Image (cartoon, rainbow, N blue to C red):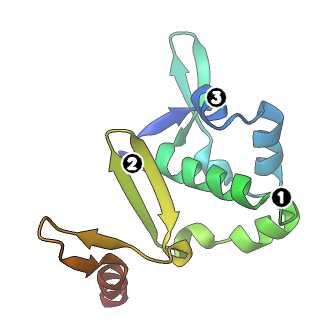
């Protein structure tokens, strides 16, 4: 987790409207790995930070599934997932969004001439070449 952008715990809780208690409940259940909780000294004391891309993707996944799946079941599903899943991370001037490749149904690029490229096929080809 070397040169990744970090997000503070406070900013994470504010961004997603989650409570401190929910975050630490997810940690206890194994939904968020311990190693993602990074303690750093700041001018106001010690604060907790997270690798932004990883934690945001995980929180979005938990929030998206928590109505349909018990947290314990989700924890079992996620065990080891970080090493196995591929992600597409889109960064725009409006922020960053991560998607698990297995959740993407379609992705197309339309150039200025109206020509369409199936980006999902291109990305999957790249992933299969890296195995």
Mark carried by residue 27: none
Q: Look at 60% across and 33% down and name the residue there.
A: 15
Question: Is residue 72 found left or right of 79 in the rendered image?
Answer: right
Query: Please, is residue 87 above or below residue 126 in the view?
Result: above
Where is residue 32? Give x, y as percent.
69, 53
Residue position marked by numbered label 3 in the rendering: 14
**Quick one: SS at disc 3?**
helix
- In the image: residue 33, left or right of residue 104: right
- The image shows residue 54 at horizontal and vertical percentages of 53, 53
Question: Which mark is first along the chain, 2 or 1?
Answer: 2
- What residue would you read off at disc 2? 2
- 100 left or right, relative to 32: left
Q: Residues within 10 Å of mark 2 (few under 14, many from 20)?
A: few
At x 38%, y 73%, the residue is 107
CA–CA distance in space, label 2 to label 3: 25 Å
Residue 109, position as x, y percentages in the image: 27, 70
Task: Give the image quarter of residue 103.
Answer: bottom right
Q: Position of residue 29 (x, y in %)?
A: 83, 56
Nearer to us in this view, 117 or 12: 117
**The label number, if any, that marks residue 67 in the structure image:** 1
Closer to us: 38 or 93: 93
Contact between labelled residues 3 and 2, with CB atoms less than 8 Å apart: no
């Amino acid at each position: 987790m070397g040169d990744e952008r970090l997000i503070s715990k406070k900013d994470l809780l504010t961004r997603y409207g989650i409570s401190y208690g929910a975050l630490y409940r997810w940690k206890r259940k194994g939904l968020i790995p311990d190693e993602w909780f990074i303690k750093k000294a700041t001018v106001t004391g010690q604060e907790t930070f997270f690798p932004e891309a990883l934690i945001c993707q995980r929180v979005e996944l938990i929030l998206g599934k928590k109505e349909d799946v018990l947290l314990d079941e989700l924890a079992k599903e996620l065990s080891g997932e970080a090493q196995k899943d591929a992600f597409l991370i889109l960064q725009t001037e409006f922020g960053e969004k991560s998607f698990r490749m297995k959740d993407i149904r379609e992705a197309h690029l339309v150039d200025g001439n109206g020509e369409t490229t199936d980006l999902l096929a291109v990305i999957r080809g790249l992933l299969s070449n890296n195995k």
